[in-house]
Image (cartoon, rainbow, N blue to C red):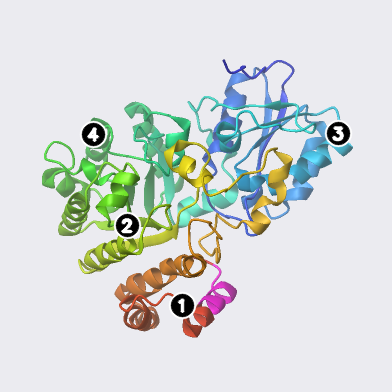
Amino acid sequence: MTKELDLSGMRRILVVNSRSGPGKLAGQVMWGAWAVASYFKTAVKDSDVKYLDENNEDDFFAKFAEIVKDRDTVGFSVTSMQIKYTLPLIRYIKEHHPGVRVITGGIHHILFPGQDPGKLIDEVVTYELPRDNFLYEFLPEKVREGYRRDRAQVITGFNCSFKCAFCVNSVRNCRYEGKPVDKILADIDYVVKEFSPPKIYFRDEDFFFDIEKAKAVVAHLLEKGYRFKWEATSRVTNFTDLKINDALLDRMARCGCVQLRFGVESGSQKTLNHLRKGQTVARIKRAVEQCVGHGISANCSFITGIPGETAADREETYALISDLHALGPLVEILGPQVYRPYPGGTLYEEVKKYGLHFPASFEEWENFYDSNPTGSVFDESPGYPWLSAAENKSLPKVWEVAHYGLNWSAARNPVKKLVGFWFKNLHWRPRWFGGPDLWLFMFLRKKLLKNGI
């Protein structure tokens, strides 16, 4: 049984979300840390809670050093990639304020519940704290600006009941948790009133898992006459006569739905079965075609470099990508990105057979990603033992050719369209994932274009 977090002795609390890489994810919502700060604020009587997100603070360390002076507790929400940037902050606390209680939690500890945290950490939370509230007082100003300028987010559900072999949800063995409809509708109304966003993303791993919830949201938007555009995530298997049908798609389009996101993953039925996706290539095509038919964009994500995947399997994926792209500019291709292993689950058991190991202690993760870059779309060489040297070199570049060749070829911008024409015809069609022109373009892309992919 997991020991519950002792809230006694906590009052002046700081919750910290450090960055996860050399660059900051400015403007992005860090739901885990935000939920923790909100939980402490509501659960600890007379609490004084501060929240700092390194991604959204220009003078982060100066603010951190100032706030921590009078705190009795500092909590860090961490993924594995954040450890490199979290440990120096913990060391600072222990050196300058040794009486402060340091607590760490987050997905890293959920994935590695028995891992030695070391002597720097006073307590580890290996489970999810309650997520009943998201207090907007903790939302960083840069996120607020993004809500007003580009896109707000409203959370409508947590987790996923499906157990795809590659996904962290299969490791956590969690189930879908829907947020109560009345709270969702109240949150939508608040966000619209406070931020007047041009677009809202209904953050949910499967917005249509609870179809009645989805229909209630659509009905609310139609009743209120809201003018914002919106997007959500769905499984292609939701496209049935009883769930996402033409009538619902028509209502969705009328109330501003502009995009649905799908985890397509592969065009090989063998690979889909191996990944336990529970979907067929035919259903993928049907879902995307229905979206396009109602003027709704379909964002289709793919992965490659999976243990057991053959060149023939990858070619089936490339063929499906081409088929979906041929449906028109409303189809957006995301990836294929190289598979990234999570500990646990059936696919990870296969990975271990190839000798891939993760660090044995919390502190050993600090420099793990320096030589194992598996977290950025700009990763160049994963070095996976189940792939050949040529595959390790070429597969990370497939997404570059697909994105800049296919997505850009459908762009309205004439420069993007020209670049897209080049990579679509000279690289995608002949399956040439390399070359000096691609190298030069990506070099300039990384140096000159700071925002967007």
User: Residue at left 39%, top 69%?
Assistant: 403
Q: Is residue 285 above or below residue 406?
A: above
User: Label 1 vs label 3: CA separation?
Assistant: 52 Å
Q: Is residue 127 above or below residue 387?
A: above
Location of mark 3 (residue): 97
Whether tag 2 and tag 3 are in contact, CB under 8 A, the answer is no
- Chain-order first, disc 4 or disc 3: 3
User: Label 1 vs label 2: CA separation?
Assistant: 25 Å
Amino acid under label 3? His
Q: Position of residue 85 (x, y in %)?
A: 70, 48
Q: Is residue 327 visible?
A: yes
Residue 299: mark: 2
Whether tag 1 and tag 3 are in contact, CB under 8 A, the answer is no
Q: Position of residue 103 (x, y in %)?
A: 70, 29
User: Label 4 vs label 2: CA separation?
Assistant: 20 Å
**Secondary element at image label 1:** loop
**Secondary element at image label 2:** strand
Q: Nearer the viewer, mark 2 or mark 3?
A: 2
